[in-house]
Image: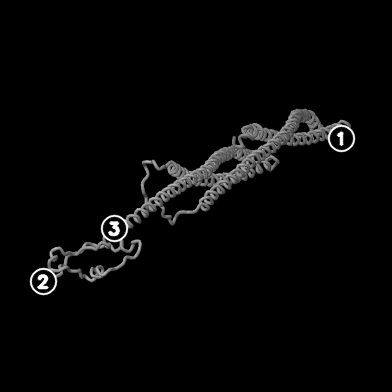
Amino acid sequence: MSSGVLVSRPHFDSRAVVQAAGPTKHTDADAAVTDGLYPSSGLATAGYRSAKYTTEDWYGNNLSTLNQAVADRSNAERIRIESKTLCTETEAGTLRSQAEGTRRLGERLQDMHLWKSELQRHIERLIAETDLLLGQKRRLEKALDATEIPFAIATDNLTCRERRPGPDLVKDLVEEELLKEVELIRSVQALLKRTLSQAVNQIKCNREAKQTLELDWSDKYQAYSLDDQCGRYGNTSTDTQLHPTSANVQDHVCNRDVWVRVTQDNLSVAQREERASAELRLLMDRVLQETAEDLRAQCSHVDRAFSQRCVQLTEAKTQLELHLAQILEQIGAQERNVVSLRQALHDKEAPLRVAQSRLRQRSQRPHMELCRDDPQLSLVDEVDQISRSISSLQRQLSAARSSLADLERSRLVLEKGVGSKTHSLLIDREKCMAQRTRYPTVIALSGY
């Protein structure tokens, strides 16, 4: 058994030794401790020998412990001061960031409110403009329906005038004006239909623009509500929670310039449609006014032509009736003349029979008594004179009868002419002109 007793050494803090105020002097005992050798007093002290530190080690260890405590205390104080400063700075920075975020949210809310108000204003203007355009559209539809009455009147007038008697079935000024009226009504109807189609398309564009603005307004209203809720969040709010991935920027998120440009583009489209709608309303109003004036002007031309034609027919009828009265008077006189001529012829028959009977009797005289004496010559002259009278009366009777026949033909022609003029007047004045009193007014043709 070795004279040296080996025991376990307590832990030695080398850090305290390094941090000691100065270098320590190494003795032989220290060297012995380092080498694991301890001095021995002999066998008598063998039971008291143990692995112990030296006094210098004790002082050094104590000094290192004190120095370590001082260093730890200084480091802790520095960390505490730095922590306090950091907490103050981070608190101020957090409050500034939060205030800046709240301010920017407020500015964003103001921007959205302004754009939302602008969108609302243009939506209301588009609604009002569309309502006005719908009113003009209804006017167009009423005006288009109102043109059916003039068209029916004009075509019915033409159809009725086709039933005029032969002599009066002429292409007069009335027919020309009626044909012009029919063509004018057809062109007006075509123009109103084209304008009505434009109005329908414009109303569709207005509603599409309004729908786009309403969608944009709805998005901004929802975003405004969300940002307003975000602006109301505070550090004491109970409805907040952590969202670690919320700060990640999504790929589909647009920047502010694109956001403003999209709204401006929507407003520009709405303004363009609003201007186009206003211009179309002015065009529709002008079309309605001009077409109504044109139709009424043509109606006046037709009415004036009808009046002139009725005056002409009345004058012609008056002249025919005057001549018919004269013809009837002449027919009566001629008939009486024929009767008198026939009576005169009848009156000549007895004298002729007497004269011829005398000549016949005297031709039976015997022998020399059958001479050409004065009675014979007188009787011959008498028979000749009566025969010439009869021939003259017969010729005159034939002429009177021929004249009477001519008078009868003239009477028939005049009566037919009077009847024709009466029928034409009935058609033009009683039928056509009476029907034209139902012609729509300018207000009705304007769609009111």
In terms of image quadrants, where is residue 317?
Answer: top right
Residue 419: give its label. Answer: none
Residue located beneath label 2 in the image: 1
Left or right: 152, with 215 as reference point: right
In terms of image quadrants, where is residue 331?
Answer: top right
At x 54%, y 39%, the residue is 124
The amino acid sitting under disc 1 is Cys
Instruction: Give whichever of 295, 330 is nearer the camera.
Output: 295
Residue located beneath label 1 in the image: 371
Q: Residues within 10 Å of mark 3 (few under 14, many from 20)?
A: some
Residue located beneath label 3 in the image: 62
The amino acid sitting under disc 2 is Met
Percent x, y of residue 316: 73, 34
Tell me the SS state at disc 3.
helix
Instruction: Give whichever of 378, 128 is nearer the camera.
Output: 128
- Mark 3 against mark 1, which lies toward the viewer? 3
